Amino acid sequence: MYKRKIWKWTKIILMLYGVIGIALYYLQDYFLFHPKPLPATHRFSIKGRFHEIFIPFSKTDTIHILRFLPDTGKSKGAVLYFHGNKENVERYAGFAHAFTSRGYEVWMPDYPGFGKSTGDRDEKKLYSQAWQVYKLLTNSFSADSVLVYGKSFGTGIAAYISSGNRCRYLILETPYYSIPALFSHYAPIYPAGYMSNYQLPLYKYLSDVHVPVAILHGTDDGVIPFSQAKKLESLLKPGDRFIRIEGGTHHNLAGYAQYADLVKSVCP
């Protein structure tokens, strides 16, 4: 009788493990991406000067970019800003002011299916489209005047672009070690490396970045835990910066003095 009960509960646990694993596999895009598409006619209610750029990528795909202009005067340089995994550029537009107020343009592309960008998503396409935006940007600015910025999900793409191309600086706000590493934090009993459709191995790209790097992460981040960034610290070069923001969360780092000090130092 005792052995039967053990076997019964073992089967139930294994069945639950399998059902949950299957659900995690097929729903991973739902957990990872939260896009908000916009019609091409949508008018953005954003403060400051900006205009829109559309890049035809394929027959079905178009990359949409918001190009924020400096508040006054001629551009000193540009920031290529890869945003997080929610909604679209309208959600992140407010972060451009930290740079435009200092005389820098900010180019902020949307990922496929986000905002006015069209097409399906996969990791290869995310890289390819980021490369297209970088090439367009460096037609207007020298690579030495371009800062690459990644926020949350966008940190992996920012690190990828910076590892293969010239730029002046790389800033990573609330980065992850890799997508499987992040998934493993939430579901440690599953083989995330095999299950994940996205890898975005930020740690590999960071090892090949030869320009100065700054990482910012809050100790109270409830979305991408601080431990993810801490694992990246050992990969930084002499002179790179690891900025630990005590009490900072995933959404409020721009309100801390360390954030403002970093922007001032890289955007003189």
Image (cartoon, rainbow, N blue to C red):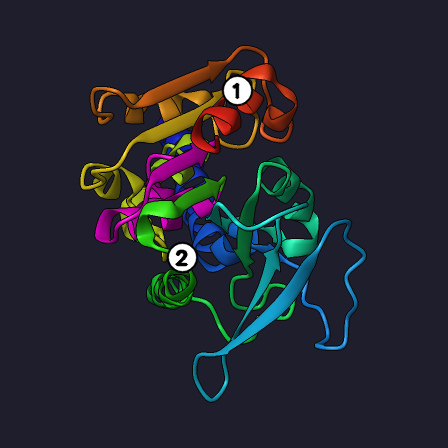
Q: Position of residue 93 (x, y in %)?
A: 67, 48
Q: Which of the 4 image quadrants contains residue 140?
A: bottom left
Residue that appears at 81% across and 57% down: 45
Q: Position of residue 108 (x, y in %)?
A: 55, 55
186 relative position to 159: left or right? right
Q: Is residue 147 magenta?
A: no
Amino acid at circle 2: Phe
Residue that appears at 21% across and 20% down: 238
Q: Which of the 4 image quadrants contains residue 71?
A: top right
In-front residue for pair 158/124: 158
Residue that appears at 25% across and 53% down: 165
Residue that appears at 50% across and 57% down: 29
Amino acid at circle 1: Asp
- Bounds of the magenta span? 153-180
| Gap in angstroms between the C-alphas marked 1 and 2 | 24 Å
In-front residue for pair 246/134: 134
- Residue occupied by mark 2: 141
Q: Position of residue 112 (x, y in %)?
A: 52, 68
Q: Earlier in the sequence, mark 1 or mark 2?
A: 2
Q: Position of residue 73 (x, y in %)?
A: 62, 48
In-front residue for pair 197/4: 197
Q: Secondary structure at mark 1?
A: helix
Q: Residue furthest top?
A: 246
- Residue occupied by mark 1: 261
Q: Is residue 175 visible?
A: no
In-front residue for pair 251/95: 95
**Neighbour tally class for label 1: few under 14, some 14-19, many 20 plus, Cα within 10 Å:** few
Q: Are marks 1 and 2 in contact (CB under 8 Å)?
A: no
**Neighbour tally class for label 2: few under 14, some 14-19, many 20 plus, Cα within 10 Å:** some
